[in-house]
Image (cartoon, rainbow, N blue to C red):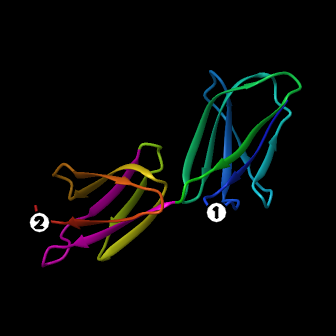
Amino acid sequence: SHFTGRIVDAEGKRPAQTEIVLWLAQTTSGRVYKVQDKDGSFDIGPLPAGSYRMEIAAKNLGRIKLRHLGLKAKEKHSLGEIRFKKPASLILDFVYPENGLGDMAIVNVYCRDGSNKQLVLSDQKEATFQVSPGSYTVSLRYGNTRPPRRQKVELLSGSATRLQIRIEEP
């Protein structure tokens, strides 16, 4: 039995650095497959019949999760074209205290799909992240004593969203 399909980005091209993780249902360890075909096609098998779940990850495009994929004995199950949405841009502008950073500042960008990013600040004025569309929480931790400040943001496909992150003295 085999799973087949084609993975493409919003323009219909194979995304760079694409991986498929496939799990047999009720198991905790999956097997990783790299998508190598130039057009994004894949053929995974031979596999035993059963119920599967699949996660497809592509650099800067996020993850697509497929659940409850049934596979019968000697079946070639086509998943068709699996298309990633256009990435979103999250632009963070940093405003520092007049006397600069007195302690370590860390910015975390958390997404529900698990594609998290972290940035340790020095003196950069701006940081841009290309991320998959979705709901994010931006968290700033400055020094070790204060709880992090959090801000929620919804990023739409193809959009650019700018947030100002003000770093204040404790």
Amino acid type indicated by mark 2: Glu
> Residue 152 appears at what percent x and percent y?
28, 50
Depth check: give the residue in front, 104 or 141.
Answer: 141
Q: Is residue 6 above or below residue 22?
A: below
Q: Quadrant of the C terminus?
A: bottom left
Q: Is residue 11 left or right of residue 109?
A: right
> Residue 88 appears at what percent x and percent y?
45, 61
Q: Is residue 133 above or below residue 100?
A: above
Amino acid type indicated by mark 1: Glu
- Residue 95 falls inside the magenta stretch: yes
**Mark 1 sits on what residue?**
11
> Residue 129 appears at what percent x and percent y?
43, 64
Q: Is residue 73 left or right of residue 88?
A: right
Q: Which mark is residue 131?
A: none
Q: Could you tell me which residue is drawn at 82 percent across and 43 percent down? A: 43
Residues under numbered marks 1 and 2 in contact, where contact means CB atoms less than 8 Å apart: no
- Residue 168 falls inside the magenta stretch: no
The residue tagged with tag 1: helix, strand or loop?
loop
Q: Main secondary structure of the magenta part?
A: strand
Magenta highlight range: 87-111
Q: Could you tell me which residue is drawn at 58 percent across and 44 percent down? A: 64
Q: Is residue 125 above or below residue 65?
A: below
The residue tagged with tag 2: helix, strand or loop?
loop
Q: Which mark is residue 169?
A: 2
Q: Residues within 10 Å of mark 2 (few under 14, many from 20)?
A: some
